Structures are given as C-alpha cells and as structure tokens.
Image: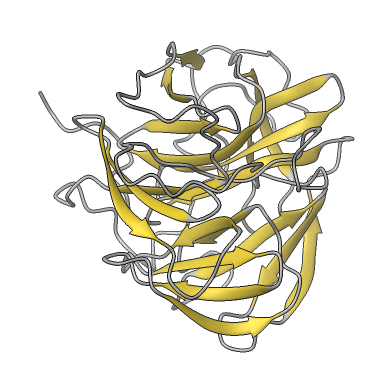
Amino acid sequence: MRHALVCLGFVFISLGCNATAGSPFGGSGAAGGQGGASASGGGGLGGSNPGAGGAGEGGFMFPDDGGTPDPQLPGEVFGHSADVLYKLEPYTKQVTVVGPFQGCSSVIDLAIDKDSKIIATTFSGLYWIDKNNAKCTLIANGSYPNSLSFVPAGTLDPNVDVLVGYQGSQYVRIDTVSGQVSTIGGIGGGYSSSGDIVSVKGGGTYLTVNGSGCGDCLVEVDPKNGSLVKNWGPVGFASVYGIAFWAGSVYGFTNYGQLFEITFNQGVMQVSGEIPIPNAPANLSFWGAGSTTVAPPVPPPK
C-alpha cells in the first residue's frame, strides 16, 4: 500500500488494503466473509463469537440458489500491488505476473464475480479490469472502499453477484453500472475493517478487522448485512491488506510483502508460516486481492 510495484520478474499477489503508518489507507480495510459450513466442533482460535450462536466453522448458511461452486475450476487467485496485477495458482503456490495496470493506477483493492470478471477501486474511481492483460475500463469516478468483494447470487440479489465492501465499520453495496454506494449494514461490536473481505458460495465470508482487542483478526460476517458471525482470532501477521479464498483456505497478503495460508480444522483456525516468494523485490507491498465467488469451498479429494 505504500509503494508502487512495476517489477515484472516478481511472482506474488496481493489481496485487500489496510491502513498503517506510512500507508495511504485511512484505517478501513478488509471486509468480512460469509459464514461457511454449519457450525460444529469446538470453538475457533480466539474463542469469542459475539455475533452468532454455536462455535465451529462458520455460522451463516448461503441460500441454495445463485451460482454453484465449481471444484473443476483451474486454480486462480488474483492480487496486486498499487500498479501491478498478479495471479496465484493456489494448488502449486506458483505466482505469476499478469502485468502493470493499463489505464488506472494506485489500485487499492479488487473483487471477482462468479464469471471471474474483476472490478477494482482506486483512490478516485471504480474500474473493470481485464484479467488477461490488466487493462482498466472506467465505470465511475468517486471515492470507494479499499475493502471489496462480490457476494454470491441469492445473497443480496436473487440472480446476480453483488459488489460490497466495508468503509470502516459500515457495510456498503456498490452498483457496478452507476458506481453508486449505499450503506446496508455494519459489523458492530467495536470492530472495523482492517484490510479486506472475501466471499465464496459455500465457503464463507471473511474479513480482517481491528478493534475490541483485535489487531488483524480474521472474522466471519453475514453477507446480507455485514454483521459479525464469528471471530476466529488474530492471524499473527500485521497489515493484512488482502485476503482471498480457494479450496477451504484463506490466503493473506500483507503490506510488507508476506503471503500466508489459513486453514480450518474442526473449529480451529491454523495459520501457516510465511510462504516464500522467490525473487521478491525489496519493499514489496500488497494492496489487495480477490477470488471468484464460486471458488471450490473444500480441498479436492486426494
């Protein structure tokens, strides 16, 4: 979030955007993810679940209509620095450079719908992004969240994915034609988005937050109104500006150029160590990331 990245030799990707000293982001960031499978098992890391009943993996159940998770999808998670788009292959952990953004700059987050179409926000506008060449097409000028995701069809609209985000603690909906922003809820509990949101059909809606004793905690939220469902606890990394989801794992990307993986096992969150990034430039900084709303919700069978 602090430095533009134009080095095409690097292999890494970024997710949502967050605010720190020296960062252009003013404190709002990640938005929450939809609660995944029905609650079961013991309490997650961090223990508390002030927004929902039983402990376990998730709490919000998605409607059955509107978009089907596709276990046969090729693995792809997109992320970015301020000026370069990257793609992560989540099965092999290989990262490739798509290229510099063309026609927009200082990209602060992106979101991906069920058809793998990318929308991104900058400090001054809302854009469609071509996932093959990072070309930007302006939708509207204005101020938009640095915490962005689509939620699956059947959540806020019966037929189409809807673009949402967090502005601090407020949960907003963004019209992808006009660019109009409207508040539809909030997380509550003294929490505020700290980096990014990602939502997957059958896999949950996840958000990184600060507040109420949390610094970069991972929570699940209700994608219908943005309220807290479950607090999974601290992720152990700072300034997690982007998150994405694939096959049961949440991938975190930090303002310090770090990549890590979060998995969930019987109600317990497990955070990997840092995933090495070969040939990463010094001062690498990730500003955002995203994944399709129909990413596989569970790992493929072995």
Q: Would you say 275 lies left or right of 137 here?
A: left
Q: Position of residue 85 (x, y in %)?
A: 40, 54
Towards the viewer: 154 or 177: 177
Q: Position of residue 202 (x, y in %)?
A: 40, 46
Q: Is residue 225 visible?
A: no
Q: Position of residue 151 (x, y in %)?
A: 52, 60
Residue 66 location, quadrant = bottom left
Q: Would you say 238 lies left or right of 50 here?
A: left
Compared to residue 283, the image places residue 47 above or below, namely: above
Quarter that holds the C terminus:
top left
Residue at x-position 48% and y-position 76%: 103
Towards the viewer: 302 or 28: 28
Residue at x-position 17% and y-position 49%: 74
Towards the viewer: 264 or 213: 213
Residue 32 location, quadrant = top right
Residue 196 location, quadrant = top right
Q: Position of residue 229 (x, y in %)?
A: 67, 37
Q: Is residue 102 visible?
A: yes
Compared to residue 292, the image places residue 288 above or below, namely: above
